[in-house]
């Protein structure tokens, strides 16, 4: 293990260029490589909030570092934009440290973090959650003095006529993560525009021979348990490849269909069991997952903030003789029509 070492480059022959204070720059040859660079936070520049550039605008991850590692408070009166898990957790953490958290504002009609974090971090501390609402302007010159928030319509366009001002000294952003794929692009890997990460097989192999990937660099996870499962699979697959052993090639493509935002892995082999990880586009109460015509499974509910897992085995896949399976999530016939806010409230109460 090489701690305190930065990876500068990796080429198609899996030669990895490393840099460290102890060894300088050196190149390591490998029989297989696993990409596990994780993800980075989306910043203010990615969401284009109007206003000046005062101190006091920071991401939830930076706030976490300031409080937990450095013993510093980012501010005394905080507005949180976005309902990602780190932001929800920091709402509770800051409250416990004596900071006033004015509220959490989420542009979507549903939260993007786990429902349990909404309950434990917001509801239990009486921190207001405003769905379908966003920050449209930051005020202040040297330091944040306030923000302007506004509700949004169904197309997520701010309704400026209904906006209002909030006095605060800090704006904390929890507006999502982006898979860190600079090395993947340098390698010329095929990337999935839906996940922002590499296209991977059922063995977590990328489009480049001998290169595997797992975790948030492939797609953003809500639970570390799923990251661990992918890492074990990628590590074992890489070890087999380095040892000269190759599994049966995948022969079925998986295509995200109705109401499915993304699905990993992108291909399956019909001779072994797989776990599919998918995200829905909108909340559902009582729904069905359909994998082509070979599998149908009932769900009590499905929300965008939580990964849905589907296990598929050889017994199911052997009955399919095509090249591609489409995975859909559709309402059940016995489901009553509900909106996103109804589903959210029902499953966080």
Image (cartoon, rainbow, N blue to C red):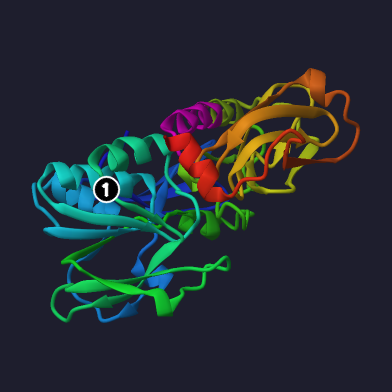
Answer with the quarter of the image where residue 317 lies: top right
Category of crowding for the residue at label 1, using alpha-carbon neighbours closer than 10 angstroms: few (below 14), some (14–19), many (at least 20): some
The residue at the point 31 percent across, 35 percent down is: 120
- Spot occupied by residue 273 in the image (x, y as percentages of width and height): 69, 22
Q: Which residue is mark 1?
A: 127
Left or right placement of residue 238 versus residue 7 in this view: right
Left or right placement of residue 71 versus residue 36 in this view: left
Up-down: is 216 above or below 144?
A: above
The residue at the point 16 percent across, 66 percent down is: 169
- Spot occupied by residue 258 in the image (x, y as percentages of width and height): 74, 48
Judge by depth and name the residue closer to the eye, 5 or 53: 53
Judge by depth and name the residue closer to the eye, 182 or 169: 169
Q: Can residue 182 be seen by looking at this rendering?
A: yes
Judge by depth and name the residue closer to the eye, 249 or 197: 197
Q: Main secondary structure of the magenta part?
A: helix
Number of on-image labels = 1
- Spot occupied by residue 327 in the image (x, y as percentages of width and height): 74, 40
The residue at the point 49 percent across, 57 percent down is: 108
Image quarter of the N terminus:
top left
Question: Is residue 94 on the magenta stretch?
Answer: no
- Spot occupied by residue 195 in the image (x, y as percentages of width and height): 57, 51
Left or right placement of residue 293 versus residue 291 in this view: right
Question: Is residue 234 on the magenta stretch?
Answer: yes
Badge 1 marks a residue whose secondary structure is: loop
Image quarter of the C terminus:
top left
Q: Can residue 275 be seen by looking at this rendering?
A: no
Q: Which residues are magenta?
A: 221-235
Answer with the quarter of the image where residue 303 lies: top right
Which residue is farthest top? 315
């Amino acid at each position: 293990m090489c701690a305190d070492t930065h990876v500068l480059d990796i080429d198609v022959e899996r030669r990895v260029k490393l840099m460290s204070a102890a060894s300088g720059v050196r190149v390591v040859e490998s029989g297989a490589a696993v990409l596990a660079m994780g993800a980075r936070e989306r910043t203010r520049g990615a969401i284009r909030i109007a206003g000046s550039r005062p101190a006091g605008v920071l991401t939830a991850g930076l706030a976490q570092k300031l409080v937990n590692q450095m013993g510093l408070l980012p501010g005394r009166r905080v507005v949180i934009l976005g309902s990602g898990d780190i932001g929800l957790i920091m709402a509770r953490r800051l409250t416990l440290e004596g900071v006033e958290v004015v509220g959490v504002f989420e542009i979507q009609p549903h939260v993007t973090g786990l429902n349990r974090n909404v309950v434990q971090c917001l509801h239990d501390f009486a921190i207001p959650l405003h769905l379908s609402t966003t920050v449209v302007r930051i005020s202040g010159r040297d330091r944040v003095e306030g923000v302007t928030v506004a509700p949004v319509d169904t197309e997520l366009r701010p309704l400026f006529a209904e906006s209002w001002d909030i006095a605060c000294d800090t704006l904390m952003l929890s507006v999502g993560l982006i898979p860190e794929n600079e090395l993947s692009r340098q390698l010329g890997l095929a990337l999935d525009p839906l996940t922002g990460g590499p296209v991977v097989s059922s063995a977590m192999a990328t489009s480049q021979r001998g290169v595997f990937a797992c975790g948030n660099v492939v797609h953003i996870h809500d639970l570390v348990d799923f990251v661990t499962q992918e890492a074990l699979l990628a590590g074992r697959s890489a070890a087999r490849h380095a040892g000269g052993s190759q599994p049966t090639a995948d022969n079925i493509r998986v295509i995200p269909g109705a109401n499915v935002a993304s699905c990993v892995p992108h291909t399956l082999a019909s001779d072994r069991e797989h776990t599919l990880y998918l995200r829905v586009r909108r909340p559902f109460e009582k729904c069905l997952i359909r994998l082509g015509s070979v599998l149908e499974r009932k769900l009590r509910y499905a929300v965008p903030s939580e990964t849905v897992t589907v296990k598929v085995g050889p017994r199911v896949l052997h009955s399919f003789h095509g090249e591609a399976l489409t995975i859909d999530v559709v309402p059940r016939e016995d489901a009553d029509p509900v909106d996103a806010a109804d589903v959210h409230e029902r499953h966080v109460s």
